[in-house]
Amino acid sequence: MKRFKSAGHVQRFLSVHDQIANLFHRTANSNVAERREASPQAFTAWAEVTGVAVSI
C-alpha cells in the first residue's frame, strides 16, 4: 500500500488501472512495427473514454 491512505483507495485505483493498462500493454514478443500500429488505436480509445482530444 505504498503512498495510499487506505485499502479502499488502493482498490479503487487498481480497478481502474487494470482496465486502462490493458489498452496500452503489448506482449514481450511483439515487434516495434506492431507497437507503432497499435499505439494510435489505444490513444484513440483512451480519448473516446475520457473525452480528451488526441494529438498524435
Image: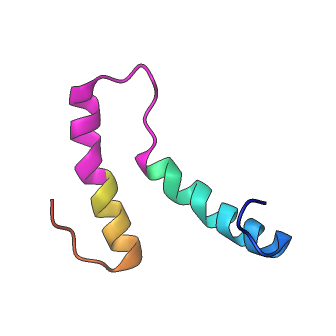
* Protein image colouring: rainbow
> Which of the image's four quarters has the C terminus?
bottom left
Depicted 45 relative to depicted 22: above or below:
below
How many numbered marks, from 0 up?
A: 0
Depicted 7 relative to depicted 17: above or below:
below
Among all residues in the image, which is located at the extreme left? 56
Give the quarter of the image for residue 1. bottom right
Q: Is residue 23 left or right of residue 17?
A: left
Give the quarter of the image for residue 28. top left
Relative image position of residue 16 (x, y in whole percent): 61, 66
Among all residues in the image, which is located at the extreme top? 29
What residue span does the magenta drawing correspond to?
Answer: 24-41
Among all residues in the image, which is located at the extreme right? 7
Among all residues in the image, which is located at the extreme bottom? 51
The residue sitting at 21% across, 28% down in the picture is: 33
Q: Is residue 8 left or right of residue 12?
A: right
Relative image position of residue 6 (x, y in whole percent): 82, 74
The residue sitting at 29% across, 35% down in the picture is: 35
Residue 28 part of the magenta-drawn span: yes
The residue sitting at 41% across, 48% down in the picture is: 24
Residue 54 part of the magenta-drawn span: no
**Front residue of this view, candidates 52 and 7:** 7
The residue sitting at 32% across, 70% down in the picture is: 47
Depicted 44 relative to depicted 53: above or below:
above
Relative image position of residue 34 (x, y in whole percent): 27, 30
